[in-house]
Image (cartoon, rainbow, N blue to C red):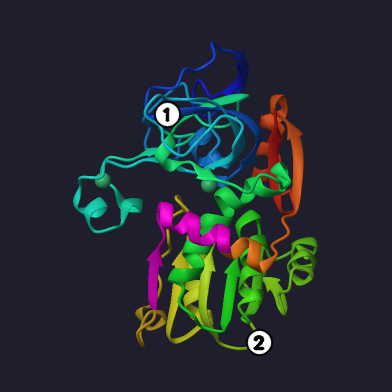
Amino acid sequence: MKAMVLQRHGELLTLMERPDPQPSTAEVRVKVAACGVCRTDLHVVDGELPVHKLPIIPGHEIVARIDLVGREVKGLQPGMRVGIPWLGYTCGKCRYCAENRENLCDRPLFTGYTRDGGYATHVVADARYVFPLADSGDDVATAPLLCAGLIGWRSLRLAGDGRRIGLYGFGAAAHIIAQVARWQGRDVFAFTKPDDVAGQAFARKLGAGWAGGSDDAPPVELDCAIIFAPVGALVPLALKAVRKGGRVVCAGIHMSDIPAFPYRLLWEERQVLSVANLTRDDGIEFFGIASQAGIVTETVSYPLARANDALLDLRTGRLQGAAVLVP
Ligand SMILES: [Zn+2]
Ligand SMILES: [Zn+2]
């Protein structure tokens, strides 16, 4: 198989030829059709997350067809169209697994971080964490749903059901979740980098009733906000924008430090919380919602060998919507 491999943090990925991976009895092997590029991949490449495995093949928004099935796998057959997300394994035994919060498992594996992911022609995955997808459908358009959509959905649920919702950072996740929020009948307020006029126009096109810079005050008080950008300074800004009792959800796996802020921004029962990972139930729920809401993703495709360009475009904010690699 071919893969784009991270050998050392901070270096470019290298295109490598590797032996085809073989699934164990509980795994499947898939042929990758498309793999989305998530901001988490940048954090992995940059070494901003604790190091577990190097070299590593990044990528956890995988749309694929099964080509080999382990002996003990049930319900999955060669040729099936499937999605492989960030959550690659949970222990099933720790207190979080027992409490039905497998997203917080003590001994998890994550696709493209602690096990090899989808920047490749083939991937092996634990069959229990693979989502069957509708047989038809655009592979590139579907890929961003596997993380941007899923984590976005979990964030939206945790934000509560307030009508006026602020989205800070209008990238892959926000462009999907804005559509879901509109479908739910909410009013979307989009916050981009202060001078990102194109990003603000993009947000309005996707249903945001108001779009402005992250340092702008929204025209009305918000009920809740989700911060997708990895920028800690947005936390006090978002707290300032939400009403009494309002909630601010931090959706990313990594964020720069949150600056000190006056207690009065948190006072009056405002809440700040983070969202970590996903559960398999989130995935099942979200794929149902995604088809009902008629989500249309905006994507930019790159050949697998150009993964470094895709990462650079994400890093520099040159992208609108989501980058997707096609092997
Ligand atoms: Zn566990
Ligand atoms: Zn992701």
Instruction: Give the crowd class for mark 1: few <14, some 14-19, many >=20 residues within 10 Å.
Output: many
Instruction: Give the crowd class for mark 2: few <14, some 14-19, many >=20 residues within 10 Å.
Output: few
Three-letter amino acid code at disc 1? Answer: Glu
Three-letter amino acid code at disc 2? Answer: Pro
Q: Is residue 165 above or below residue 245?
A: above
Q: As drawn, is 26 to the left or to the right of 242?
A: left
Q: Write down the residue under mark 2.
A: 219
Q: Is residue 139 above or below residue 288?
A: above
Q: Write down the residue under mark 1.
A: 27
Judge whether residue 217 can be spotted in this image.
Answer: no
Residue 107, given in percent of the width and then of the height, sits at 27, 40
Q: Nearer the viewer, residue 67 or 218?
A: 67
Q: Nearer the viewer, residue 264 or 36?
A: 36
Mark 2 and mark 1: Cα distance apart in space = 51 Å
* Element carrying mark 2: loop
* Element carrying mark 1: strand
Judge whether residue 17 can be spotted in this image.
Answer: yes
Residue 223, given in percent of the width and then of the height, sits at 51, 83
Span colored in magenta: 271-288
Residue 193, given in percent of the width and then of the height, sits at 67, 62
The N terminus is located in which quarter? top right
Residue 78, given in percent of the width and then of the height, sits at 57, 29
Mark nearer the N terminus (2 vs 1): 1
